[in-house]
Image (cartoon, rainbow, N blue to C red):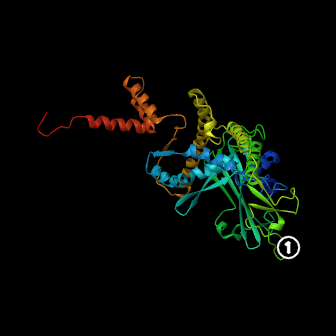
Amino acid sequence: MFNKILSFIRDWIKKMIGKQTVDKALNVEVAISSEMASAVELWAQMYENDAPWLRSSSYAKGTEDVYSMNLAAAIAGEIARSVTIEMEAEFSGSARSTWLEQQFERVMDKLRHQVEFGCAKGGLVFKPYITGDQLAVDYVQADQFYPVAFDGDGNLTAVVFVDQRRRGNNYYTRLEYHTMIDQGCQIINRAFKSSNKDTLGQSVRLDSVDVWAEIEEEALITGIDRPLYAYFRYPMANNIEAGSPLGVSCYSRATDLIRQADLQWSNLLWEFEAGQTAIFVDELAFKRDDDGRSLLPHKRLYRALETGSVDNSLFQGWSPDLREQNILSGLDAILKRIEYACGLAYGTLSDPNTVDKTATEIKISKQRTYATIVDTQKELETALEQLIWSMDVWATIGGLAPAGGYEVAFQFDDSVVVDKDTQFQQDLRLVGQGLMSKVEFRMRNFGESEELARKALQEVDAERQPMLIPGEE
């Protein structure tokens, strides 16, 4: 479906570009290859536990015995948890800043889950919009938007969003095209109706769907030089489409390893199932049902044998040796390769009891996770700053908030490799030795901006001043 809609969007954009110059028209093209589109679709299937090789997959053919360890979701979830745990956003500046903070709190409530989607599929778009006297945010996953253009820094400057609704036997699809032009941000909306969800069908009015009735077909937001959405890109080089600014999944380099892990896990399950104790008994020892089949007292324990099939013995026991330790060792080795490919410390997925435990090895392993988390936090912070800027613009357009400026500072937890208590004591000694300022100490340990740190220190100094009693000098 992803590739089908992609081709329809390419055709749609080509029809729309008559409003622009021929030169610009030649440059308007959906900026994603078929290989990249297929990769995004695979990452989505893996995250949704529907990978092509799985027993439960709707795509599976002849792979009935392969079960999932659900590693894709586990990896994305672990990274998202580490990125957002104890994350804080601190607003300051004016009454407008307070209003923006209230709107952003709803984003923070959903952020961990949305970051998980972005890590799994390679990217996520935050798209704010006005609803009544408030702002809301659409979270558009990588298989729900189509990039059109990037600037020289890799920022997404033109994109098509897809919104599909079902009404009865028909599918209504809205394409929302955002692009930056000289005057500002141009937004174009078109609606289509089809009896097949994989095709756009015929063009219809936007009010054909109630929730789209108030959406304008075309709008131009002037006076801005950035788009009114924010793109969170997972910080890993794109080895699917080299040179593309698009993000890739956090497990993009481990897809085949994850398949191997699922196969090994399935082998382990089969080892236990096939190695269950059984008693093979001559069929003459059992009663029969109306169809002549042996009535077994315990179907998992007893097996019926044809008369005289085992040296004419009445019964024989079956209790094979299990090879689970060998299989588990092989699985653990695969999990370690997955951890390495995904930038995670050993023991995140694999058995932590088998991980080398010298101080140096532990530090190096943790630093691999730390680098992954810090890089992801930087990308997320950039995206959230753009989101808040977009929310500020929409607040001005809708007259939703009082005039004024705002400042926002983000604080992320770094306890993946940093012992907070140890760091606090070390920094405290540095302050005492005059090697660290009190402002830097508060910023580092309390997550305050420089302005708030200085203000807090001024309040502390004010409280230290002796109180003047009337009549005394």
Residue 453 % position (x, y): 40, 36
Check the image and name the residue furthest to the bottom: 290
Circle 1 is placed at which residue position? 292
At 48% from the left and 34% from the top, the residue drawn is 419
For the N terminus, the image quarter is: bottom right
Residue 87 % position (x, y): 51, 45
Image: 350 above or below 313: above
Q: Residues within 10 Å of mark 1 (few under 14, many from 20)?
A: few
Check the image and name the residue furthest to the left: 471
Image: 453 above or below 135: above
Q: Is residue 189 visible?
A: yes
The residue nearer to you, when weighing 170 against 51, is 51
Residue 407 % position (x, y): 48, 43
The residue nearer to you, when weighing 52 against 290, is 290
For the C terminus, the image quarter is: top left
The residue nearer to you, when weighing 315 against 85, is 315
Q: Is residue 375 visible?
A: no
Amino acid type for the residue under numbered disc 1: Gly
- 266 left or right, relative to 436: right
The residue nearer to you, when weighing 57 against 472, is 57
Residue 448 % position (x, y): 44, 39
At 50% from the left and 53% from the top, the residue drawn is 105
